[in-house]
Image: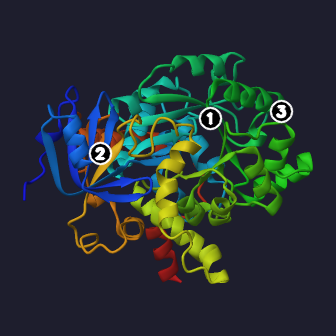
Amino acid sequence: MNKLTRDALTGSDRPLLLVPDAVLLPEGPAEGHAVVVADGSFQRVGPLADVARTHPHLEPVPLPGHLLMPGFVDSHHHLTQSFGAALAFGEPSEIFRRVWVPLEGALDEEAAYVAAKLAVLEALRGGFTTVADAGTRADVDVEVVAAAARDAGIRCVLGLVRNDADGEIVSASSASSAPDSAEKHLARYEGDPLIHASLAVSIPEAATEETLRHTARLAAESGAVLQIHVNEHLAGVERSLVRHGLRPLGHLHRLGVLGPHLLAAHATLLTPRELTLLAETGTAVSYNPVASAWKGNAVAPATAMAERGIRFGLGTDGTRGDGFRLADAAEFAQRLAYGLATGDSSCGAGWTWLEHATRGGADAVGLGARTGAITEGLAADFLLVDTTTPELALSWDLPWELVRRGNRDQITAVFVAGRLRLWGGRPVDWDGAALVRRAAELARRAVGGAAITRVHPTSTVARAVRTAK
């Protein structure tokens, strides 16, 4: 058997005729298929004999023991929060007030760049080829985050936060809430091959009604996505009821904010009526199962969303960057929250979570016509997954196995826009180890200088307190 080598895949200027053991198509795995990658996209996908016949000038590149599959799409991330990592562990809900806002406020330009690039490196290592950043509160030009994503080689839906309401959840920079800031942001990244402009409001109460309406209208008219955390925590739902007489989603609906342009992050606390509103308006959701387990009040009813045809992707919320573990958590959370009580032993049959981690996620973040599937004409954002490992070699149902038994250790290569970005978990054209070392230095400074408030001590201190009793 030929051994796959990195050298066979490098060289972004030449077309590649890739011949894996199988290709994960939208309808399922297909053996005996090949793909042609050229100019950053899939030029041809089909049976090997047909592809070879139409491209006789290309030398086939065998990919023995590998599956070629779409890259994962992280539909909800906070790239400049990576220095915080375990600070959120064991904490009650709404930690953004006590941890994330102070931490991001302590970042200077270099720290914001390194934090974002560190998060992107983790995402690429976990098989994500696209991340949707919900906007930074750091007092820096958002281009700093764009540069980090671009330099690392990931596709990024880049949010500009437009918080302008009085109170404690405002943007660190007043420039982002200026009247013309949204238009400038949307125009700034037109034609950028990797950065896709998006608008954002942290939570509905963080922006005035005028700004919510205006931002939604701009997003809809420009074809951009508006990202808002919606119905995530009980406290937020109750504040909305007191202030507006409506839950957050209902409040946004009254203002005309719902629609295909809106990406509602979390949406864990939904009534049957709210599910109907999402379905009727075409609003998309980011289902973030790990975030629910680590710091949430509830699990979004994603199986019900799938049944109702509600658009949704899977998001990490910056918890951990492993696409396979995210898909597993998506199914696992549905089983524990809903499936066990109803006797649903399938909970999406595996393929549902794989679908929404890739093509469904791309649709949710506004890139359904650009990426998310191994389809001719779409961007060549894909993974080469080693299927000779003990977890996947004895395959009976590959989609299920990818969801429950896949992990990032099985990812040999990550491609974005047709270029090899990672090989064996390491960047191919920049020093990932040096970045991690610098991040460790800057993180100590940022966390030490931020007014972070934690309810619980570290696990080591907690153990010492308990054993001392």
Q: Residue furthest right?
A: 245
Residue 55 visible in image: yes
In the image, is residue 380 above or below residue 308? above
SS state under label 2: strand
- Disc with the residue nearer the chain's start (3 vs 1): 3
Query: In the rendering, at what x and y percent does residue 429 appear?
Result: 21, 33
In the drawing, what numbered circle is on residue 396? none
Q: Residue at x 40, y 65 (%)?
A: 399
Report the residue marked by disc 2.
414
Three-letter code for the amino acid on which mark 1 is drawn: Val
Spatial CA span between label 3 and label 1: 18 Å
- Return the residue nearer the eye: 221 or 147: 221
Q: Position of residue 420 (x, y in %)?
A: 25, 38
Q: Nearer the viewer, mark 3 or mark 1?
A: 1
Label 1 or label 2, whichever comes before in sequence order: 1
**Residue 169 or residue 446, whichever sits in front:** 169
N-term mark: 3 or 2: 3
In this picture, residue 77 sits left or right of residue 173 = left
